[in-house]
Image (cartoon, rainbow, N blue to C red):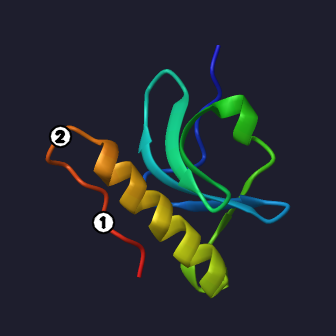
Amino acid sequence: MYLKLKFRKGDFISKNGYVIYIIKTHQNGVVEGVANYSCFSRYNDFELKEFEKVSRQDLSKIDVSEINRAIIDYNKLKTTINEVPLVV
C-alpha cells in the first residue's frame, strides 16, 4: 500500500543538502525527478518521506545550476516532445 504523496510536479524537496525537482508523479507512488547531485531518477514514495518541501528562493545558485544541468541532460535523453522547462 502506498502513502498519499505530499509532493506534486514542480515541487522542490530537500533533505541534508540533496535537492530534487519533481517532474512527474505516478498513481502507484513512483516519483520522477532530477536532483542537484545526479541526473534523472525514479524514487518510491517511501524513499521521500523524510524530505521537506522547499521554495525556489531557498535554493542556492549552485543547486539551481546543477538542477538545470540535470534537466538539460534529461531533455537530451527524452524521445518525446514534452521537455521539462529549466528552473530560472
Q: Which residue is mark 1?
A: 85
Indicate the secondary structure of the residue bearing disc 1: loop
The answer to whether residue 42 is left or right of residue 1 is left
Q: Residue at x 33, y 43 (%)?
A: 77
Dot 2 surroundings within 10 Å: few (below 14), some, or many (20 or more)?
few
**Does residue 55 appear anywhere in the picture?**
no
Image quadrant containing the C terminus: bottom left
Tell me residue 69's x, y (percent). Answer: 47, 66
The answer to whether residue 87 is left or right of residue 50 is left
Q: Compared to 66, does 7 lie above or below?
A: above
Tell me residue 15's x, y (percent). Answer: 80, 58
Q: Compared to 76, does 86 lie above or below?
A: below
Q: Which residue is mark 2?
A: 80
Q: Residue at x 64, y 80 (%)?
A: 62
Are the residues flagged by discs 1 and 2 in contact, CB closer than 8 Å? no
Q: Of residues 56 and 42, which is closer to you in this image?
A: 42
Q: Residue at x 57, y 69 (%)?
A: 66
Disc nearer the start of the sequence (1/2): 2
Dot 1 surroundings within 10 Å: few (below 14), some, or many (20 or more)?
few
Tell me residue 84's x, y (percent). Answer: 31, 57
Q: Residue at x 44, y 26 (%)?
A: 27
Indicate the secondary structure of the residue bearing disc 2: loop
